[in-house]
Amino acid sequence: MVNPKGDDAGRERVTLLNTTPDVINLQGWSIADKNKRKTMLAALELGPGATTLVTLSSEGAQLSNDGGIITVLDKQGLKIDGVSYTREQVARQ
């Protein structure tokens, strides 16, 4: 959720889905925004088809209400996946 009602701090969320047939260890992984701010992910294992909900704090990655980019980085800092979203998509939430 990019633009929750009220104050956004600590209420913006990103859902991660493991689309692979393998268990993925998220220890050391992070989510980055378009300004390169990062939120570290919890050290957990995500099974095939499983999801985890990541709540972003005001100190790390932020979801801009004007649209942006969210990138998932592995522990080496390499891009694993990413998505962009527009202001129009935010407005429809």
Image (cartoon, rainbow, N blue to C red):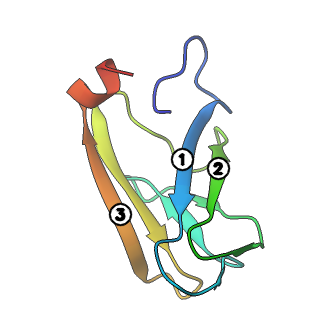
Percent coordinates x, y for residue 58 in the rendering: 64, 38
What residue did someone put label 2 on?
A: 53
Amino acid under disc 1 = Val
Q: Nearer the viewer, residue 58 or 5?
A: 5
Observer-side mark, 2 or 3, equals 2
User: How many angstroms separate mark 2 from mark 3 (CA)?
Assistant: 16 Å
Position of 86 relative to 81 (above/below): above
User: How many angstroms separate mark 3 from mark 1 (CA)?
Assistant: 11 Å
Label 1: state its secondary structure: strand
Mark 3: give few (<14), some (14-19) or many (20+) Cα within 10 Å. Answer: few
Q: Please tell me which of labels 3 and 1 falls first in the chain.
A: 1
What residue did someone put label 1 on?
A: 14
Mark 2: give few (<14), some (14-19) or many (20+) Cα within 10 Å. Answer: few
Please report the residue visible at 50 percent of the width from the left and 42 percent of the height from the top. Answer: 62
Q: Please tell me which of labels 2 and 3 falls first in the chain.
A: 2
What residue did someone put label 3 on?
A: 82
Percent coordinates x, y for residue 13 in the rendering: 58, 40
Mark 1: give few (<14), some (14-19) or many (20+) Cα within 10 Å. Answer: some
Please report the residue visible at 66 percent of the width from the left and 75 percent of the height from the top. Answer: 47
Label total for image: 3
Amino acid under disc 2 = Leu
Q: Residue furthest right?
A: 43
Task: Say left or right for 34 vs 13.
Answer: left
Please report the residue visible at 58 percent of the width from the left and 24 percent of the height from the top. Answer: 8
User: How many angstroms separate mark 2 from mark 1 (CA)?
Assistant: 6 Å
Task: Say left or right for 64 vs 45.
Answer: left
Say if mark 2 contacts mark 1, CB within 8 Å.
Answer: yes
Q: Nearer the viewer, residue 86 or 48?
A: 48
Position of 75 relative to 13 (above/below): below
Q: Please tell me which of labels 2 and 1 falls first in the chain.
A: 1
Q: Which mark is residue 58?
A: none
Amino acid under disc 3 = Gly
